Image (cartoon, grey):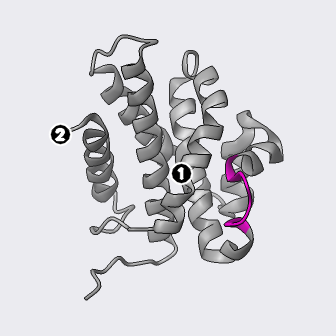
Amino acid sequence: MTFEEKIHENLYQYLLSQNEIDTRFPDAIDIEDKWPSIGQSYMVDGIREFRDYPTVSLGWMMYVGMAVAKFWDEEWEIYGNLEDLYLYLRDKEGFDSMDEYIRRDVLQLHTPDYDTTEALVQSCAEMAYSTLRHENIEPGTQQAFEAYVACLHQLYLMGAAVQLYRMGYKMQALG
């Protein structure tokens, strides 16, 4: 099992136990296709924040995945054509407040869902960080960078899966 598969399985099982995702993981091609540009754009901010705020650096990507799923559901013909969805989200209120902006303005959450979502993302970010730390990868290496990117990718996908599930999408095999 690769490191990314391990992160996926850990997060998937946790979210399943919390009844936050469907048993069948979504195959959301439009959302996945946005990952390379979002991931690349996020690196500057994410890496800068990782040393002092590792769970923020990881968790904010889950919020981005949630926002992209919401955009996909509502107005993908507009949002899908934006050159950089990450910068679009970040620049609304800045990196430090991006979580609040997404929960409040994009997902339109109110208490208690606002707080529940914050706790869920925090738990997932802590789980990803713990898994990363237990790999005993030397910091600053190519392997460390690749493991960090794997965490971000899976948190992005999990955020999208959670949001799709919350919006009522049920994944079914076709054919």
Magenta segment's dominant SS is loop
On the image, the x and y values in percent for residue 125 come to 45, 36
Task: Classify mark 2: residues with Cα within 10 Å, few (<14), some (14-19) or many (20+).
Answer: few
On the image, the x and y values in percent for residue 34 come to 57, 56
Q: Which residue is drawn at 66% across and 76% down?
A: 74
User: What residue did someone put label 2 on?
Assistant: 1
Q: Which residue is drawn at 54% across and 47% down?
A: 36
On the image, the x and y values in percent for residue 64 come to 60, 50
On the image, the x and y values in percent for residue 130 come to 34, 27
**Vertical placement of residue 125 versus 121, above or below:** above
Q: Which of 133 and 34 is in front in this view?
A: 34
Q: Quadrant of the N terminus?
A: top left
Q: Quadrant of the C terminus?
A: bottom left
Residue 82 counted in the magenta span: yes
Task: Classify mark 1: residues with Cα within 10 Å, few (<14), some (14-19) or many (20+).
Answer: some
User: In this rendering, would 53 be left or right of 74?
Assistant: left
Circle number at residue 35? 1
Q: Which amino acid does label 2 sit on?
A: Met
Q: Which amino acid does label 1 sit on?
A: Trp
User: In this rendering, would 61 be left or right of 142?
Assistant: right
Residue 151 position by quadrant: top left
Describe the element under mark 2 as helix, strand or loop.
loop
Span highlighted in magenta in the image: 79-86
Q: Residue furthest left?
A: 1
